[in-house]
């Protein structure tokens, strides 16, 4: 099984430079917190009903926008992690690299586990972890 390709956004690979950033999200959260506090206070202080209703609509719209922004930011994190397939300080290969190296033998296994003869050959980085044995999930 090969690892999935880049995450697409509107038909193109997702780029971190496009779209809202963390500063925009923080600003949305600050305005949302202010509106959440001000809305019930506007009712308690006897402000006009149309103003209190408007503040309530602002809260609902900000919840929608902030929710969409956080989903976009989480997709950026996922795209970044997929582009870096190996953890920063890892000396061993990732599961995706092991699956890619196993090739057609792993796909032919009926129980979903790779056969012992389909294991990838060890390189110098993996030589230190040979005494640990195979790792299962």
Image (cartoon, grey):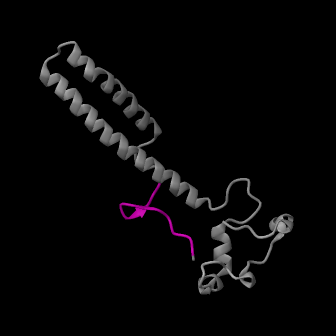
**Residue depicted at 64% across the width and 78% down the height:** 113
- Residue at image position (39%, 28%) is 30
- Image location (x, y in percent) of residue 93: 72, 66
Whether the magenta-drawn stretch holds residue 76 is answered as: no
Q: For this rendering, which residue is in front, 103 or 6?
A: 103
Residue 33, given in percent of the width and then of the height, sits at 37, 27
In x, y percent, where is residue 126?
81, 67
Residue 19 versus residue 50 in the image, above or below: below
x and y percentages locating residue 82 in the rendered image: 56, 60
Q: Quadrant of residue 107?
A: bottom right
Tell me: residue 91, above or below residue 99. above
Depth order, front residue of 120/26: 120
Give the image quarter of residue 47.
Answer: top left
Residue that lies at the very extreme toward the front in this rendered image? 111
Q: Is residue 6 magenta?
A: yes
> Which range of residues does the magenta coloring cover?
2-15
Q: Quadrant of the N terminus?
A: bottom right
Residue at 86 percent across and 67 percent down: it is 131
User: Is 130 placed left or right of 38 in the picture?
Assistant: right
State the count of labels: 0
Q: Main secondary structure of the magenta part?
A: loop
In the rendered structure, the answer to whether residue 116 lies left or right of residue 25 reads right
Q: Quadrant where the C terminus lies?
A: bottom right
């Amino acid at each position: 099984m090969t690892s999935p390709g880049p995450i697409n956004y509107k038909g193109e690979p997702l780029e971190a430079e496009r779209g809202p950033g963390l500063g925009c999200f923080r600003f949305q959260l600050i305005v949302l917190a202010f509106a959440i506090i001000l809305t019930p206070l506007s009712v308690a202080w006897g402000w006009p009903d149309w103003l209190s209703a408007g503040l309530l609509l602002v809260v609902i719209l900000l919840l929608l926008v902030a929710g969409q922004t956080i989903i976009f930011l989480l997709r950026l994190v996922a795209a970044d992690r997929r582009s870096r397939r190996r953890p920063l300080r890892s000396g061993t290969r990732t599961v995706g690299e092991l699956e890619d190296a196993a090739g057609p033998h792993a796909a032919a296994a009926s129980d979903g586990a790779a056969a012992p003869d389909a294991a990838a050959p060890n390189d110098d980085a993996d030589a230190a972890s040979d005494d640990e044995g195979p790792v299962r999930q």
